[in-house]
Image (cartoon, rainbow, N blue to C red):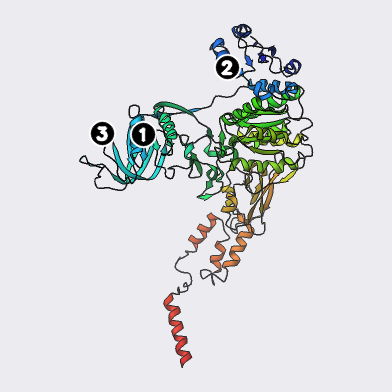
Amino acid sequence: MAEKPRIVFVCSCEKTMPLDAEALRRGSRGANVETVNHLCRAELERFRAAAAAGAPLTIGCTQEAPLFSEVAGENAAIAFANVRETAGWSKDAAAAGPKMAALLAAAAEPLPETPLVSVASEGVTLVYGRDERAIEAASLVKDKLDVTVLLSKPREVAPPRLTEFPVVKGTIRAAKGRFGAFELAVDDYAAPLPSSRGKLEWAAARDGATSRCDLVIDLSGGTPLFPAHDLRDGYLRADPGDPAAVMRALLKASELVGQFDKPRYITFSDHLCAHSRSKIVGCRRCLDLCPTGAIAPAGDHVKIDEYICAGCGACAAVCPTGAASYALPTADALMRKLRTLLSTYREAGGRQPILLLHDAPHGEELIDALSRHGDGLPANVLPLAVNELTQVGLETVAAAFSFGATALRFLLRAKPRHDIAGLSKTIALAEPILAGLGFGAGRLGTIETDDPDALGAALAAIELARGADTPATFQPLGAKRDVLRLSLRELHRVAPAPVDVIALPAGSPFGAVQVNVEGCTLCLSCVSACPTGALKDDPERPMLKFAEDACVQCGLCQATCPEKVISLVPQLDFRAATAAARVIKEEEPFHCIKCGKPFGTKSTIERISAKLEGKHWMFKGQAQRLEVLKMCEDCRVIAMTEASFDPHGAPERPRMRTTDDYLREREEREREGKA
């Protein structure tokens, strides 16, 4: 049975914004577009009838989403798009028809479900403070939480008249764990004496006590116990001198009892990780960027604590192999939404689109304020909300420009919630690629503001530029590294001025290796260390080959090479995807002088023989011993057995010189000089 066509309701919101019905229908892609003026009130029955018919629905309104969901019931599939604040309430509203069509189409693009992890909290809470204010705070939540008060270096604290919860003293030396499972190391720990009269007196203190709890309310006013403390679930920190902040922390804590689900932001495949091999560290991009300390080394790969992870996505954005990938949504799902947004905008008649990526809490509030109190967004600025801007990687940027965007801006807070170092690296990597392909400079950038007027001015200042003449239409599918290769290949195909090779900054995830061939002994240590198979050997003959498309510039080959003849060359070679692995060095194998079996390389065996012959004490005057080095492993054993080689029959090894020898010789020289 064929699926019913989607019905799209676009409301003028009591005629406060013009509707370009023709542009909306051009971008409808088979959907039935109905324009209305008062859908949530006077024309609600039109919506009720459409919902009852069972067709999928798209509503161009988010303000009344609860009402429409209630009317439609649980069986109706509804997508909501905000076309009022993002398009209709603007000085360019008359030209915003293509943008409205694009926003409506993108809203209907399905997204995969996000995996969840379950967290349990029984409300065991430690209130950490310095004086009576911590005790007062605990008394406010004692009926909802199982509280203990820990006072750090308290002075004079009046004993409570009634012991309703434990009050102890101590200073937290170290803290680890997460919401539902914190573990704190406490020094100077002591319980109060029950006989305390005018002030709390303490029993003998001890160091090394351990406290385990579900929640920590930090009212100490000191250094936070965790890095990026505001991103650590279950750790609530407030200035004890700010009663409002303390009350907000207490109210939030009182709600954190029970079973909770949090998104598993990162999907991690440890077999793809290029962190280390044989205890030699290569890639550590994610370790350097994680603000919460959720990532830690775990042998040859890293481990991500899904309970501590705050979802910034920086690790996934910079991961060169795709071992870490973002799941809210996945990279390919986000790129499909981009494809729908930009292609629909073009089909509906839009030109020179500028993509504005933002998060929901900050970006939507700023865009709403600009539409209500300012000029609104320009007609060619297409806003798209993502969970966190720091999740955006090179694959998304490349896809945006290959799909037809002429510029891209990231809307950030004036003081970003997450560290944007990873996003800055993504921009620094994408800029030379775009410039090298003819898109021009300044196509990427950030807008860091909390002021809607500043946002409007920054968008108005963007120079209109040339985009792809024939934008790509590819369907992004697959893992992160796969869609990255695909988006870059398509970007190169549609670029205004494509070139084959673009130099990239150091630390980029693309490039070649340069080998000093004369110094290479073909030991193939680099091959065993390479986590992606970019460096390969040949089972038939001594050979080192390199496939640039697989190289992620992790540096493990460079760190492993005993001869130190490997260096990294960061670059993007668009020919690498279809090129065969090139031979870096090839040698004739050395043939065993007994059986003729090939083993090792000719240059290596000859070099070793030359270094030992007549020079090493074990081989002086022992030609037969030197010949053994030129035999394969089987013939070597036979020859040594037949010749009855005595390991102690070699010439006497020179006696080792000690400090006493040097001192004695110096004394002898001094005596001879005096004589």
The amino acid marked with disc number 1 is Ala
Question: Residue 141, how many percent across, how many down?
Answer: 35, 29
Residue 250 in which image quadrant: top left
Question: Residue 249, how many percent across, how many down?
Answer: 43, 33
Q: Nearer the viewer, mark 2 or mark 3?
A: 3
Numbered label attached to residue 263: none
Question: Residue 615, how many percent across, how many down?
Answer: 56, 71
Indicate which disc, 3 or 1, sits on the residue closer to the N terminus.
1
Q: In the displayed structure, would residue 515 be above or below residue 14?
A: below
The amino acid marked with disc number 2 is Ala
Q: Residues within 10 Å of mark 1 (few under 14, many from 20)?
A: many
Numbered label attached to residue 65: 2
Please give left or right for residue 622 compared with residue 382 in the image. Answer: left
* Cα–Cα span, label 2 and label 3: 50 Å
Seen from the viewer's position, the closer of residues 288 and 235 is 235
Q: Nearer the viewer, mark 2 or mark 1?
A: 1
Q: Quadrant of the N terminus?
A: top right
Q: Which residue is mark 1?
A: 137
The amino acid marked with disc number 3 is Thr
Q: Is residue 533 at all visible to an observer of this figure?
A: yes
- The residue located at (47%, 39%) in the rendering is 229
Q: In the displayed structure, would residue 467 be above or below residue 530?
A: above
Q: Secondary structure at mark 3?
A: loop
